[in-house]
Amino acid sequence: MSDATENEGRTGDGTRAVRAGLPEPVKHEPTLPGPVFAAHFHLPGEVTGPYAYGRDDNPTWTLLERAIGELEAPGREDVETLVFASGMAAISSVLFSQLRAGDAVVLPSDGYQVLPLVGAQLEAYGIEVRTAPTGGDAQLELLDGARLLWIESPSNPGLDVCDIRRLTEAAHARGALVAVDNTLATPLGQRPLELGADFSVASGTKQLTGHGDVLLGYVAGRDAEAMTAVRRWRKIVGAISGPMESWLAHRSIATLQLRVDRQNATALTVAEALRQRPEVSDLRYPGLPDDPSHKIATQQMRRYGCVVSFTLPTRERAERFLTSLRLVEDATSFGGVRSTAERRRRWGGDAVPEGFIRMSVGAEDPEDLVADILRALDQSAD
Ligand SMILES: *Cc1c(COP(=O)(O)O)cnc(C)c1O
């Protein structure tokens, strides 16, 4: 390990975020080089690396991959990071490159709403899919004979948390690989590779990039052979991130610590305000000391995310609440600097009540946001 790398491991999150992935300074060149738009690169004679064809590699990806790697696994050089067109492209690349017909995979039953579609596709290819909820480490019971364990912690949208280290040790003892969906936590909130996982996979569309204008995904992994297969999958499927999106993502990562600290602190404030309201039930935020997830979350998370979930008595009440909000847009996705909320059941995918709201807390002033939410709760009352 070089001195520089060791030092990166020791600096604070803000320092690492603003410098993540930057190349050595070059006189008269920008600090973060602009996006490289190229389908192909000059390649006289023999085929040599690193850049030949734009579906395989791109210098703008290289810098972004370095940046994400420095946040997911500071100071470690055995970790490889690959960026993808979206979180789903990243997730699919791990599952479809690692599993074969006859293998068994353990998925969460309460994970991201597209995961069941992936599960059905895996089954169509002859892979056995087993599911259990995230809470209570219920996936532990299904590990015998499994080839891969997929964890989503905290889960979206229910915000349950499982003990990643415990599940990973149990999976490894049975020879299974472990992947963790780290979307909700971001690498500043949780480092799955340090908790023992083989892959940390995420949608960069959410808080990592934080402005609601980019779709992105990534896989960070420490098993070289497994990552070679993930890289091959990206080449085969071609689910690559555009240079412009990659560059926007890298620029956005410079403010990751600022955004995450502000948004997550306000999320706790919002959760505390919602807790006082009689019409709010099943309030979940892993950062609330009395949340069922709090104990495990404090063991493995450094920050608790910007998403709060809760249930209002009826679908109509939830709809009126969303319409009454002025500072919170009714929109899906989460993690952006502008607060959003939605009635999650409208999609049909998640097993949540009709009045279930997933709220993503943005970078607005906390007092303004809390006032808007309390006013909308009053206004939407019967
Ligand atoms: C949004 C999301 C995804 C999918 O990411 P896309 O970038 O939309 O493809 C996967 N997992 C979780 C937990 C998510 O929230």
Image (spheres, grey):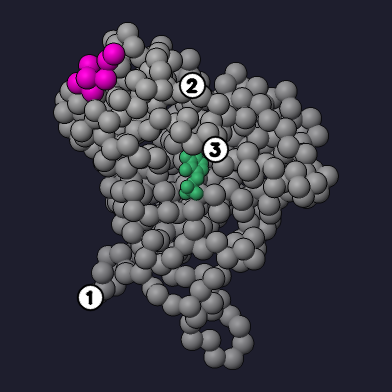
Q: Nearer the viewer, mark 3 or mark 1?
A: 3
Local packing at callout 2 (Cα closer than 10 Å; few below 14, some 14-19, many 20+) is some
Which span of residues is magenta-colored? 375-382
N-term mark: 2 or 3? 3
N-term mark: 3 or 1? 1
- Drawn side of residue 184 relative to residue 114, left or right: left
N-term mark: 1 or 2? 1
Local packing at callout 1 (Cα closer than 10 Å; few below 14, some 14-19, many 20+) is few
- The residue drawn where x is 34% and y is 11% is 279
- The residue drawn where x is 60% and y is 40% is 115
- Which label number is shown at residue 28? 1
Identify the element where label 1 is drawn: loop
Q: Nearer the viewer, mark 2 or mark 3?
A: 2
Identify the element where label 2 is drawn: loop
Q: Is residue 296 above or below residue 119?
A: above
**What amino acid does circle 3 point to?**
Gln
- Which label number is shown at residue 113? 3
Q: Residue furthest bottom?
A: 45
Q: Are marks 2 and 3 in contact (CB under 8 Å)?
A: no
Q: Are marks 1 and 2 in contact (CB under 8 Å)?
A: no
**What amino acid does circle 1 point to?**
His
Tell me if I can see residue 357 in this picture. Answer: yes
What residue sits right under mark 2 in the picture? 353
- Which label number is shown at residue 42? none
Tell me if I can see residue 273 in this picture. Answer: no
Q: Quadrant of the C terminus?
A: top left
**What amino acid does circle 2 point to?**
Pro
Local packing at callout 3 (Cα closer than 10 Å; few below 14, some 14-19, many 20+) is some
Q: Residue furthest right?
A: 102
Where does the image place residue 195, in percent across and percent down from the top left? 55, 34
Q: How many marks?
A: 3
